Amino acid sequence: MGRTDARGVVTHPTLATSREFLTAAVVIVVVGYAVILKHGWVVTRIDIISAIVALGALGYSFWLPDSERLIVETAFKRNERLSQFAVFVVFLAFYAITAGSDVSPFNAHVRQAFAFIHGHTYIDAPNYIEHAQVGPYSYQLHPILPAILLMPFAAIWGMNTNQNYFSIIVGALDMALAWRLLGHFHLTVNARKWLTVFFGAGTIIWYETVNGGSWGVSMVVAILVTLIALDETFDKGRPAVVGFFAGIAGLARYDLVFVWPVYLALLLFWRRRRIRELFWFIPGCALTAAAYIAFNYARYHSIFDRGVVYYMPKDQQTLFAFRFFPGNFFTLFFMAPGLYSGFPYIHPTFGGQSILTTSPAFLLVLKASWRRIEAVLIALGALIAVTPSLFYVGNGSAQFGTRHYLHAFPFLLILMALGVHRRIDQMSRILIAVSVFSIAWGVWSIRFYGLNG
């Protein structure tokens, strides 16, 4: 049973939808295991966990009663929730299998979580971990939300906590939340599938999730809480909930603090919330500000994060300037992959690759109707989110794609949903397929040939 539009096209997930996702997860696991065993690679614990979850969830889905035997609204709610879990499962399997067995040595968030558990803010930082050195103490350069989320795991496994596993789980949650968010835009189930596949496999979220390094984990966590904030905005629109998640998103990526007014504008002008209701948005932002100031004062005796200032050479301490804009703009829109004389001949450029060559389907944001106030505000949110990075001293350095702009992807996904107009057309499918191929090529190329080619 599934709701349909006037043409009989299914617009809400059915039990069969979830079974399709879960079957895909099992196929990914089976094929992945076959490849791993053929090459003699290591089967990791997250591979085993994803296989157990996929098989168990698929079996459970066949145990559930068919929708026809349930009250209509009960069936819709169950199928929607099950589909969200199924999306999580399929991407858990997908990311686990494609991550390989390597563990990123750049585990600054685990080190910070371990430090918090032991009652201090400084970390044990080897030379390869970027850090601010203040006297005898080393401090990590990243915002603290990932470390806070890692604390329960660090309390159990200590410094043996696997940051890559954490990244894979959070990345899979991101995709489940993206699927849920897309459900608010009256898309067909087929359109939701295509856009979710694009978000999870046609953008560099795939690469950053399986890479598991400190910079990537900051981004996948920022995407997580941003998706929750946007989902609440387009669902019940409770200012207190939106404010809490929009607020703490700033503890994963500082740029997202500047997007707070966009959430308020959406609640006020699109959701028609009254001014006095918007005051409930403030506590979440206040909590973020308090945590930010307290953490910085404990480290630097300053209300601001001065970590990058301590880390950068004294002659390069200008962090934001207009002169950095041309290089960052070029990276974002024009930097192409490199050409090499040996196989695989075309390889990701060490310093990055434009969003149009990694994920050309983002061009679909241009199809959104700019006469709709929510489209204008969401576009403004995306623009505000990326603006600081455009004027930042670095473009992301060693990277595939443009990682400094990942936190704007949830806003772009909404614009794509608004531009699809319920059903996805052939050109959109082609762009998404090209995006998935491009990211798959990059993940494969870097894994087997390194980022330097």
Image (cartoon, rainbow, N blue to C red):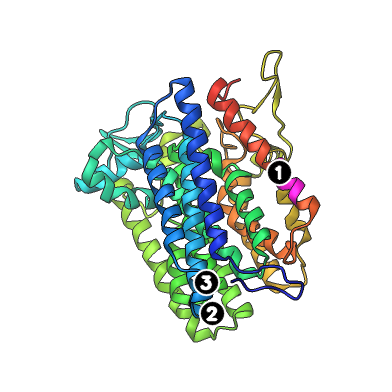
Q: Are marks 3 and 2 in contact (CB under 8 Å)?
A: no
On screen, residue 394 above or below 261: above
Q: Is residue 292 left or right of residue 183?
A: left
Q: 10 Å neighbourhood of mark 2: few (<14), some, or many (≥20)? A: some
Residue pointed to by mark 3 = 67
Instruction: Report the Cα–Cα distance between label 1 and label 3.
Output: 32 Å
Q: Could you tell me which secondary element the residue under label 1 belongs to? A: helix
Q: Is 153 one of the magenta-colored residues?
A: no
Q: In the rendered image, which quarter contains the N terminus? A: bottom right
Residue pointed to by mark 1 = 433
Percent from the top left, x then y, of residue 452? 58, 21
Q: Residue at x 51, y 67 (%)?
A: 79
Instruction: Report the Cα–Cα distance between label 3 and label 2.
Output: 8 Å
Q: Are marks 1 and 2 in contact (CB under 8 Å)?
A: no
Name which of mark 1 and mark 3 comes first in the sequence: 3
Q: In the rendered image, which quarter contains the C terminus? A: top right
Residue pointed to by mark 2 = 72
Q: Identity of the amino acid at label 3? A: Ser
Q: Is residue 310 left or right of residue 324?
A: left
Front one among 95 and 407: 95
Q: Residue at x 22, y 46 (%)?
A: 155
Percent from the top left, x then y, of residue 113? 29, 45
Name which of mark 3 and mark 2 comes first in the sequence: 3
Q: Residue at x 72, y 41 (%)?
A: 434
Query: Does residue 76 appear anywhere in the picture?
Result: no
Front one among 3 and 60: 60
